Amino acid sequence: MGSPVSPLLANLFMEWLEKQAIATALVECKPKFWKRYVDDVLELIKKGQVRNLIDHINTTDPTGNIKFTYEEEEDKQIPFLDTILVRREDGSVKFLVYRKKSHTDQYLNCSSRHPLNHKVAAIRTLLERCYSILTEESGQKKKEAHVAKALSKCGYPPWTIDRVKQDIVEKSLKDEAKKVKNTRGNHKGMVVVPYVKGLSEAFARILKYHGIATANRLH
């Protein structure tokens, strides 16, 4: 724990474990769908076979240190990572933001001795999470109101939230404009040139204006 390679090693081990478990599982309890992020798994399996699969997986690890638990769908909903997946009647899936029951909406207080950009980042993270996860506009509006109320309790005035929302919209418009610009062929490729201090920077700016990217090669 705490080592930079810990996530990599955990992911490698879990990939080996899941391949072994699925390959050796009985046909009746093999999952039809399996998606994992580190140690959180979303699976689709035949009804009544979840317990059999879990028991099988828990015997696959030779060390006996890894133990799987499971949670089944309730009321056509199931949590996965930061989301709640909701099955609609037409078979499509709606996404909601998942919050643990123990969550208290306590975030970085606006009056705390932190740089302003840290506080702006707290607002941005909550709003972008709302916009990226929720699939329906009505859900986004409801979550926006929840975020605004939670941040208000942490001392954030309404204008800070409105400002970040405006920044997110403006960034989105700029990104769309860049996509359109690139699809129109304005990006003409890249050139590699020797680096000359004081000259290469100016040369790169000129080429950028004409849609050409530059990379420098050291002598």
Image: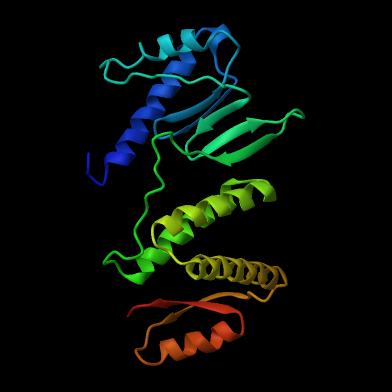
Q: Nearer the viewer, residue 178 or 73?
A: 73
Q: Nearer the viewer, residue 133 or 181?
A: 133
- Locate residue 117, reporting x and y percent: 38, 69
Quadrant of the image occupied by residue 199: bottom left
For the image, the number of numbered tags is 0
Quadrant of the image occupied by residue 104: top left
Q: In screen coordinates, is 153 left or right of 28? A: left
Q: Give above or below for 58 relative to 108.
A: above
Q: Give above or below for 50 relative to 86.
A: above
- Locate residue 129, reporting x and y percent: 52, 51
- Locate residue 140, reporting x and y percent: 62, 51
Quadrant placement of the N terminus: top left
Q: Nearer the viewer, residue 191 or 116?
A: 116
Residue furthest right as drawn: 90
- Residue at 60 percent across and 11 percent down: it is 47
Q: Give above or below for 208 relative to 184.
A: below
Quadrant placement of the C terminus: bottom left
Q: In screen coordinates, is 47 left or right of 160? A: right
- Locate residue 22, reporting x and y percent: 48, 17
Quadrant of the image occupied by residue 212: bottom right
Q: What colouring does the structure picture have?
A: rainbow
Q: Nearer the viewer, residue 89 or 209?
A: 89
- Residue at 57 percent across and 46 percent down: it is 133
- Residue at 37 percent across and 92 percent down: it is 198
